[in-house]
Amino acid sequence: MDIYRELTVVGVPTRAASALVGVPRATATRKPRTPTVTKVRVPANKLTDAERTEVLAVVNSPRFVDLPPIQIYAHLLDEGVYLGSISTIYRILAANLQVKERRRLARHPARAIPELVATGPGQVYSWDITKLAGPVKGKYFDAYVMIDIYSRYIVGAHVHAHESAVLAAEMMREIFGVHGIPNVVHADRGTSMTSKTVAALLSDLEVTKSHSRPRVSNDNPYSESWFKTLKFAPVFPERFASLGDARSFMAEFVEGYNHHHHHTGIGLNTPADVHYGLAAAKAAERALVLAAARSRHPERFATTQDPKILAIPTTAWINQPADNTGIGLAA
């Protein structure tokens, strides 16, 4: 704009001068605005720096350091002293990064995250108890279910009239006698799971006892997922007429799940095929079927590789460790 003014002073027409400097004539000839000074209005009720310092000193005094602002406000009023409103005291504390719990609180140690890895059947078992509705409202049966996290095989499912640590220990003895003793048994923090009876049994058998963190359902995903599969099945009844009825249903359902349910997490194999080492032979048979289909209609296949959903994972884990190792690995 300075060049434009210099050109017009020496007699260059405004149109030509604006063209030379590349600025529209309307912009070049516009008078500059006079800068306005905005005055910051200080609220009449604002505390002075000295008053704010006094408030901070009072609330941090030995007498009030453990009390919240509302209590300090009430004490001072009873003594005929007014330093400011409760919200004002809070604002002063916030400005000084002191808005926090002013009382002593219990400090709970951080819970260790259970990190379990299984590379084959029989290494890590997960178990839990779920309620089955009985014949009348308020009557329930307890289903104790233990699952192998690698094969997804239900190694045991017992139904009882009530929950008991003794019954849980009996179930484990029976399962271990049939399927062998695992490296790790994982469960949540229910009363039976954390009982001395179960803990003593696992200790005697040198089985590592693992528990979910409090109020973290994701730490026991295999059991929780299977309970959803059970209760969302079309055949699952609204109520069971008797304990015998519940036991009969669970036995039939577990049998069908173990031997006929093709699980997406284990290459669309049945849990029994993976648990008993039959999955590799099934994979070879499936590969031959797919290869024959490709040879007949190659245009229908985009790749010569078998679908990834048919691959059996090499590991199964609860809270996958960063290095993909954990106490559930076989020695």
Image: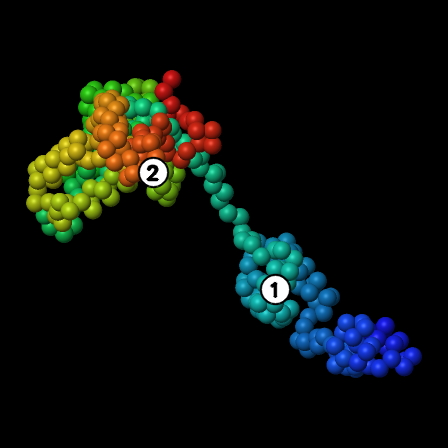
Instruction: State if disc 2 and disc 1 touch (CB < 8 Å).
Output: no
Task: Inspect the image, locate mark 1, and give the three-letter code of the amino acid beneath it.
Answer: Arg
Dividing the image into 4 quarters, which one contains the C terminus? top left
| Above-or-below relation of 264 to 48 | above
Residue 121 in sight in this render: yes
In-front residue for pair 169/240: 240
In this view of the protein, can residue 265 be seen by the observer?
Answer: no
Q: Residue 302's spot in the image, x, y percent?
A: 34, 38
Q: Give the SS element for disc 2.
A: loop
Front residue (pair 51, 320): 320
The Cα atoms of the two marked residues, 1 and 2, are separated by 66 Å
Q: Position of residue 13 (x, y in %)?
A: 84, 82
Q: What residue did someone put label 1 on?
A: 91
Residue at screen point 19% across, 35% down: 261
Front residue of this view, candidates 24 and 321: 24
Say above or below: 78 vs 261: below
Q: Quadrant of residue 153?
A: top left
Residue at x-position 78% and y-position 75%: 19
Quadrant for residue 193, please give it.
Answer: top left
Instruction: Assess disc 1: are there few (<14), some (14-19) or many (≥20) residues with their C-alpha within 10 Å of its C-alpha.
Output: some
Q: Is residue 179 above or below residue 109?
A: above
Q: Residue furthest right?
A: 10
Residue drawn at the location 34% of the way across and 42% of the way down: 217
Residue at left 31%, top 29%?
312
100 horizontally vs 17: left or right: left
